[in-house]
Image: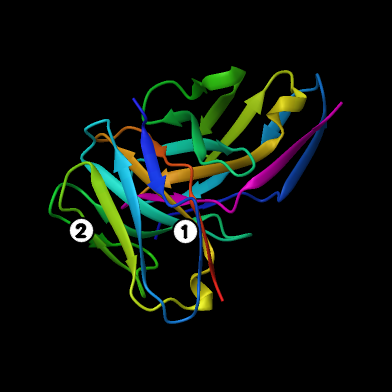
């Protein structure tokens, strides 16, 4: 039982490049989330999903897209990376109104 | 809009002393409140939650939190701090996902 895993752990991009972050959970949770963590700002919600095939915008969705084609996976895409997207990205999953389980994070640097 | 505030960026406490990490909230309706801990270069780990019921909530690693509706607070407490408790602590309220506070760095001094 791996919980929530994230791929990759680190990535460096140049401005304008694209990439996809993968989140996988093996707990059969319906809800999945993507957050970004920046110094002094806590975590902010980017996008979320309440079930397979559904996605919705969170607090800071601009510049990101997501997909949830399979229940266990939640992908976060950056189509054209910008230095402002340098951050640590966390994925989380949740069963109903319980606590969220977080992945280990992806540290992204955009030059 | 719902929000949480953690008024202290850092809290220092001596090992063996009680610790308190403060959190206040602003919500419409009944709050679902959570505390998480983050160790360096790690994801967030769940400590405890308040959904309903007793105002004193007990959680992992000896932590507890007191829900106070009149003061709109949900302070995290531990009777006797350990050096290993040193970490970044986040208070959160459930909204679409969570709304997090900005975090409080706890430093326990030996």
Q: Mark 2 — on which chain does it sit?
A: A
Magenta segment main secondary structure: strand
Residue B104 image offset from top left, x and y in percent: 66, 45
Where residue B20 appears, as percent x and y from the top left, is 69, 32
Q: How crowded is mark 1: few (under 14 residues within 10 Å), some or many (20 or more)?
A: many
Of residue A91 and residue A80, the one placed in the foreground of this image is A80
Mark 2 — residue? A55
Residue B95 place in picture, x, y as percent:
34, 50
Residue A28 falls left or right of residue B32: left
**Does any portion of residue B39 appear in the rendered image?**
yes
Instruction: Please tell me the numbered disc located at residue A36.
Output: 1
Q: Distance between the residues labelled 1 and 2?
A: 17 Å
Q: What element carries label 1?
A: strand
* Vertical side of B51 occupied by A38: above or below: below
Residue at the limit of the structure toward the left, as seen here: A53
Subunit bearing disc 1: A
Marks 1 & 2 on one chain: yes
Q: What stretch is highlighted in magenta?
A: B96-110
Q: How is the image coloured?
A: rainbow
Q: Nearer the viewer, residue B88 or A105?
A: A105
Q: Which residue is drawn at 52% across and 75% down?
A: A84
Of the numbered discs 1 and 2, the one sitting upstream in the chain is: 1
Say if the magenta span includes residue B108.
yes
The quarter of the rendered structure image containing the N terminus of chain B is: bottom left
Residue ID at (60%, 35%): B75
Callout 2: SS: loop
Q: How many labels does the image show?
A: 2
Q: Residue at x 48, y 48 (%)?
A: A105
Judging depth in this view, the residue of B66 and A92 nearest the camera is A92
């Amino acid at each position: 039982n791996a919980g929530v895993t994230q791929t990759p752990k680190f990535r460096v991009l140049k401005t304008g490049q694209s990439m996809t972050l993968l989140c996988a959970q093996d707990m059969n949770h319906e809800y999945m989330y993507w957050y970004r963590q920046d110094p002094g700002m806590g975590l902010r919600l980017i996008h979320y999903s309440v079930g397979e095939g559904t996605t919705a915008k969170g607090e800071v969705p601009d510049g990101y897209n997501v997909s949830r084609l399979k229940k266990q996976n939640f992908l976060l895409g950056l189509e054209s990376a910008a230095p402002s997207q340098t951050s640590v990205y966390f994925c989380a999953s949740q069963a109903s109104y319980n606590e969220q389980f977080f992945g280990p994070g992806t540290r992204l640097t955009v030059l | 809009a719902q929000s949480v505030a953690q008024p202290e960026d850092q809290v220092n406490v001596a090992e063996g002393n009680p610790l308190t990490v403060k959190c206040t909230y602003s919500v419409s309706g009944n709050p679902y409140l959570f505390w998480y801990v983050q160790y360096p270069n790690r994801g967030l780990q769940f400590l405890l939650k308040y959904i309903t019921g007793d105002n004193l909530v007990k959680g992992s690693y000896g932590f507890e939190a007191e829900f106070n509706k009149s003061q709109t607070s949900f302070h995290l407490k531990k009777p006797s701090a350990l050096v290993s408790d040193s970490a970044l602590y986040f208070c959160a309220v459930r909204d679409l996902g969570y709304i997090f506070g900005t975090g409080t760095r706890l430093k326990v001094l030996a």
